[in-house]
Image (spheres, rainbow, N blue to C red):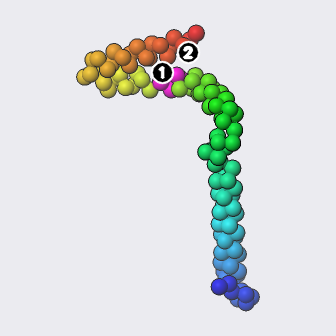
């Protein structure tokens, strides 16, 4: 229930304006969320355009591979220090680090 009478003090005016602004912000956020949900219905988009979805997935994978390799070459050395107690696993990770470093420099 909104108060339609004139505010008696400046504080009352500020409180009313603040409530109105927050209500408007909440309505805007709800509308934006509804739009995002409508736009990002992935299953529906894939069902409607399967070949386009396959192409997009391939392109994203191609673009993400160098980023993942770079992340692996950064994270794996720290993992190697932690996994010194597991020599077999450490050897596998060490091979991955060398492979990632070779791809980055090449």
Residue at mark 2: 104
Crowding at mark 2 (Cα within 10 Å: few <14, some 14-19, many 20+): few
The quarter of the picture where residue 45 lies is top right
80 vs 100, left or right, is: left
Q: CA distance from mark 1 to mark 2?
A: 9 Å
Residue at mark 1: 73
Magenta stretch holds residue 73: yes
Residues drawn in magenta: 69-74
Q: In the figure, 91 relative to 58: above or below?
A: above
Work out whether residue 18 can be spotted. Answer: no
> Who's the residue at 64% across and 31% down the image?
54
> Who's the residue at 37% across and 26% down the image?
79
- Residue 9 location (% of width, % of height): 69, 85
- Residue 30 location (% of width, % of height): 65, 63
The one of 101 and 41 positioned closer to us in this rendering: 41
Main secondary structure found in the magenta portion: helix
> Could you say whether the residue bearing mark 1 is in a helix, strand or loop?
helix
> Who's the residue at 68% across and 79% down the image?
16
Q: Are marks 1 and 2 in contact (CB under 8 Å)?
A: yes
């Amino acid at each position: 229930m909104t108060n339609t009478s004139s505010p008696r003090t400046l504080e009352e005016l500020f409180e009313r304006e603040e409530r109105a602004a927050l209500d408007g912000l909440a309505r805007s956020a709800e509308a934006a969320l509804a739009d995002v949900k409508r736009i990002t219905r992935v299953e529906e988009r894939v069902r409607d355009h399967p070949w386009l979805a396959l192409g997009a997935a391939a392109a994203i994978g191609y673009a993400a591979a160098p980023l993942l390799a770079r992340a692996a070459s950064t994270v794996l050395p720290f993992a190697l220090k932690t996994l010194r107690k597991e020599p077999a696993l450490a050897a596998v990770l060490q091979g991955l680090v060398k492979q990632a470093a070779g791809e980055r420099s090449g």
